[in-house]
Image: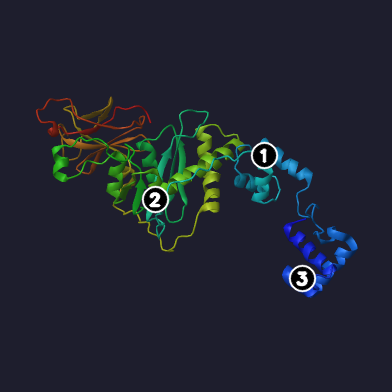
């Protein structure tokens, strides 16, 4: 008997012993006089057990049958071993045709010794940053090198809209580098438009972390941006640099979900190669993620900017180098030789300072005074390094740093 039922037994026994009235006992039990009469009758005819609820000890008519519960546990331990409780509940409904509640799945798993996928730790206090009002007002992007695939190494690059939580783009590459961010930027601008700002960390591909300043940079009051930073500057996108992981918590939570769900989904579909994973992301996962997790922005009007007609996206979102044309009208970068043909009205370009661009497909372009003067076929993409030229100078700040095409293949 519960404490409430014991109290009822005591009050009704006092009524039977003539020590109290039934009306007063009903008032103290919080029931009507008619119900107090029913309880008194049950006590007389059935004894103390008549006051116990009739369904106590009986299985609920809504409870899972034993076979179904065993089936859920079997699937959880075998086919869906890498899925969390909510994700597993969704797959039971979508693939196995079993409709149960998330709390039921959680209770079954814990009862059978299946621990939660992630340990919940108490979090430090951080002030919440409100979401942007409009879609396209702010984009958050990052790279996560913790994804383990059969083809090492592996890094997932992803970008998310701050106002809606919409996953704009995601793909796997060998490791986090300038090419990954430029590819993200190219996809965002091509599919949605130019965002107003991008929230990012201080990775060396995004932020100048060195203390070297040339005279030109000192006079300008700012360092020359990185390759990615230069592309953002050309498009008028404001870069916002986070000082802690918590500051860009929304993209960090995105990777938490991707680490959880994406890896489990790829295991379910037996996807082990980067090429297969990128196809899966593009054709299935991104759309499904946005269907489940994206939100409606506070303001319906979008903040994406259209790409101006006079902006060459391929040139803007690419690797840039400064070079001097040799006497043989050729440009040399990291072992690559780009021959410049004779232009109309100009015999040659010897000693001319030119801008060399390597596009994201690996092909090369040479520009002289914003005019395209040469093109070549693709070569391997390499991570540029900002370095000083090989010459002596008494004044350290006088060294003119430049981007050099000499690093390992990205």
**Residue lying farthest to the left in this orientation:** 394
Give the CA distance from mark 2 to mark 1: 36 Å
Give the secondary structure at mark 3. helix
Viewer can see residue 340:
no
Q: Nearer the viewer, mark 3 or mark 1?
A: 3
What residue lies at 50% left-to-right and 54% top-to-bottom? 294
Is residue 239 visible in the rendered structure shown here? yes
Q: Secondary structure at mark 1?
A: helix
The residue located at (34%, 46%) in the rendering is 242
Front in this rendered view, residue 278 or 159: 159
Is mark 3 in CB contact (under 8 Å) with mark 1? no
Q: Which residue is mark 2?
A: 139
Please tell me whether residue 360 is drawn above or below residue 22 in the rendered image.
above
Residue that carries the numbered disc 1 in the rendered image: 76
Q: Nearer the viewer, residue 164 or 187?
A: 164
- Label 2: how many Cα within 10 Å (few below 14, some 14–19, many 20+): many
User: Circle 3: is it few (<14), some (14-19), or many (20+) Cα within 10 Å?
Assistant: many
Q: Position of residue 398 (x, y in %)?
A: 12, 33
Residue 177 at x, y = what percent?
Answer: 37, 35
Position of the C terminus, as image quadrant, is: top left
State which quarter of the image contains the N terminus.
bottom right
Q: Mark number for residue 25?
A: 3
The disc, 2 or 1, on the residue closer to the chain's N-terminal end is 1
> Gap in Å between the C-alphas at discs 3 and 2?
67 Å
In the displayed structure, 144 sits above or below 22; it is above
């Amino acid at each position: 008997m519960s404490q409430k039922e014991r109290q009822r037994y005591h009050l009704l026994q006092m009524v039977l012993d003539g020590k109290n009235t039934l009306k007063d006992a009903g008032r103290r039990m919080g029931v009507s006089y008619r119900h107090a009469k029913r309880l008194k009758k049950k006590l007389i005819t059935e004894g103390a057990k008549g006051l116990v609820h009739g369904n106590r000890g009986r299985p609920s008519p809504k409870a899972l049958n034993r076979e179904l519960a065993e089936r859920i546990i079997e699937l959880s331990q075998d086919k869906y071993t890498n899925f969390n409780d909510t994700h597993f509940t969704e797959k039971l409904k979508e693939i196995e045709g079993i409709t149960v509640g998330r709390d039921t799945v959680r209770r079954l798993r814990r009862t059978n010794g299946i621990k939660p996928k992630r340990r919940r730790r108490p979090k430090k206090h951080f002030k919440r940053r409100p979401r942007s009002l409009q879609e396209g007002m702010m984009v958050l992007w990052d790279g996560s090198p913790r994804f383990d695939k059969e083809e090492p190494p592996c890094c997932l690059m992803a970008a998310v809209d701050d106002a809606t939580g919409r996953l704009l783009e995601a793909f796997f590459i060998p490791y986090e580098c300038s090419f990954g961010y430029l590819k993200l930027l190219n996809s965002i601008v091509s599919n949605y438009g130019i965002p107003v700002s991008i929230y990012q960390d201080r990775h060396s591909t995004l932020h100048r972390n060195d203390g070297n300043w040339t005279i030109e940079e000192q006079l300008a009051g700012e360092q020359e941006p990185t390759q990615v930073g230069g592309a953002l500057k050309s498009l008028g996108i404001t870069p916002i640099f986070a000082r802690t992981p918590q500051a860009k918590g929304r993209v960090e939570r995105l990777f938490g979900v991707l680490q959880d769900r994406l890896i489990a989904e790829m295991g379910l579909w037996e996807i082990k190669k980067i090429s297969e994973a990128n196809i899966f992301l593009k054709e299935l996962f991104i759309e499904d993620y946005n269907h489940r997790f994206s939100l409606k922005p506070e303001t319906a009007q979008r903040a994406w900017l259209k790409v101006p007609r006079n902006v060459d996206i391929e040139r803007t979102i690419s690797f840039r180098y400064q070079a001097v044309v040799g006497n043989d009208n050729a440009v040399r970068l990291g072992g690559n030789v780009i021959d410049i043909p004779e232009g109309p009205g100009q015999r040659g370009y010897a000693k001319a300072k030119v801008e060399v661009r390597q596009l994201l497909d690996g092909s090369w372009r040479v520009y002289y005074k914003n005019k395209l003067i040469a093109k070549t076929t693709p070569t391997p993409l390499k991570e540029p390094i900002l370095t000083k030229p090989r010459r002596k100078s008494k004044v350290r700040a006088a060294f003119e740093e430049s981007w050099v095409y000499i690093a390992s293949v990205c």
